[in-house]
Amino acid sequence: MKVFLKTHGCRANQYDTEAVRGMLAQAGVEEVDSAADADYAVFNSCSVTSAAESDLRADVRRAARLNPSIRTVVMGCAPGVTKRDESRTPLATLPTIEGLVVGGDVAAVGAALGLAVPALHAPSAQTGSRALLRIQDGCDEHCTFCVTTNARGANRSRNADEIIDEAQRLSESHPEIVITGIHIGSYGLDNGSSLGELLGRLVAETDSVRYRLTSIEATEVDDRLADLLTGDSARVAPHLHAPLQSGSDRVLRRMGRNWYTASSYCDAVTKLASNRDVFALSGDVICGFPGETEDDHSATTDLVSSLPFTDLHVFQYSPRPGTAALRLDGPVPEHVASRRASELRALAATKASEYASRQAGRKADVIAIGRGSGLTEDYLSAAIADNRIARRDRFDATLEMVEGQLVAVPVPRWVE
């Protein structure tokens, strides 16, 4: 059997695909690079936007045209969401669909492929330079623009001992492990633990490897987690990605994000990032949400301007079938939302450039994510000024700014 894998969406989906890849290897199944050469295709789907789901459907149809005899399995978010969306063709009726698997159920994917794998073991190495480690699944929140709860279900934390065992094995092949999930800040709410407690154990019970968190709500960073994020950067990357979505409390309420305000978000990230020379602060913002006024947009712009962001993901709101936001009044014209998004992107680019420029001249902890390309502890991309550095190598470097680009110059090991 030959299987083609393709992933849409977030790092949690990427982790699940790696788990499927490990299952295939365990079963002796060959992975191929093209659907044209495959017996089966497994698409790991995203439904965060209608466009993401459209991309999935286009890929399924493209694979069917390339290889009419292929059998297709779709896993991930789309199978759990599309059954609630009567406006679109059901996934099961797309050409060559053999099975649908809700979420990241690897055993169910194996069954859909006709594989009998008695016991699944997470792979000890992944294809990426940095490993992914999913610690939980699901989300208990109900943002009005999001269908994730429908797609992935309620929060479910993995057993900490299993997580640590997997991390220990991954650390043998990867210099960095990225902690991921659907809502990692809710880890432990169902088993009496917390993300800070888990991360503390990971640091204590593994050697050398650096950990990095994916997205977490700013107000979910407790004292234990804050200490880790601002402590030993060789073990925990000084990097917080905290979704903002809007700097207007009125819009946040319309979004269903009732657990924080613009002020409490500001207080939380300022406590972590302000007055630190090396700290990455990134976030997400949605422009043009229903009912957003120019005053609301200005509030977001002012808040972004005041905070030490080093990166910002700016999204233009797009209606998503199955979400409560469709029932909200006050649609924002597309050209207005686009202009607001452009303004925020320009502001974010300026802040990112200013931060990167300030890092020139300092020593950095760099991981080679590709030939000639590195990533610092504070999530800056840098060209590597030494072609002997191999992918997955971790090294100390001095950062230099050359023609507007950061360059990591490795520090010889004998230099203190």
Image: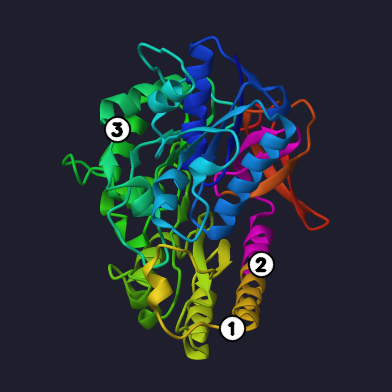
Screen quadrant of the C terminus:
top right
Where does the image place residue 137, in percent across and percent down from the top left? 34, 42
Q: Please determine whether, in this image, residue 250 is positioned above or below residue 134.
A: below
Amino acid type assigned to the residue bearing label 1 in the image: Pro
Disc 3 is placed on an element classified as helix
**Separation of disc 3 and disc 1 at Cα?**
49 Å
- Apparent side of residue 124 relative to residue 400 in the rendered image (left or right): left
Between discs 3 and 1, the one toward the N terminus: 3
Which residue lies most toward the left here? Answer: 192
Q: Please determine whether, in this image, residue 205 is positioned above or below residue 402.
A: above
* The one of 174 and 45 positioned closer to us in this rendering: 45
Residue 410 seen from this side: no
- Mark sitting on residue 201: 3
Amino acid type assigned to the residue bearing label 3 in the image: Arg
Q: Residues within 10 Å of mark 3 (few under 14, many from 20)?
A: some
Disc 1 is placed on an element classified as loop
Which range is magenta? 349-378
Between discs 3 and 2, the one toward the N terminus: 3
Where does the image place residue 174, in percent across and percent down from the top left? 54, 26
Q: Residues within 10 Å of mark 2 (few under 14, many from 20)?
A: some
Disc 2 is placed on an element classified as helix
Where does the image place residue 74, in percent across and percent down from the top left? 51, 37
- Mark sitting on residue 46: none
- Mark sitting on residue 333: 1
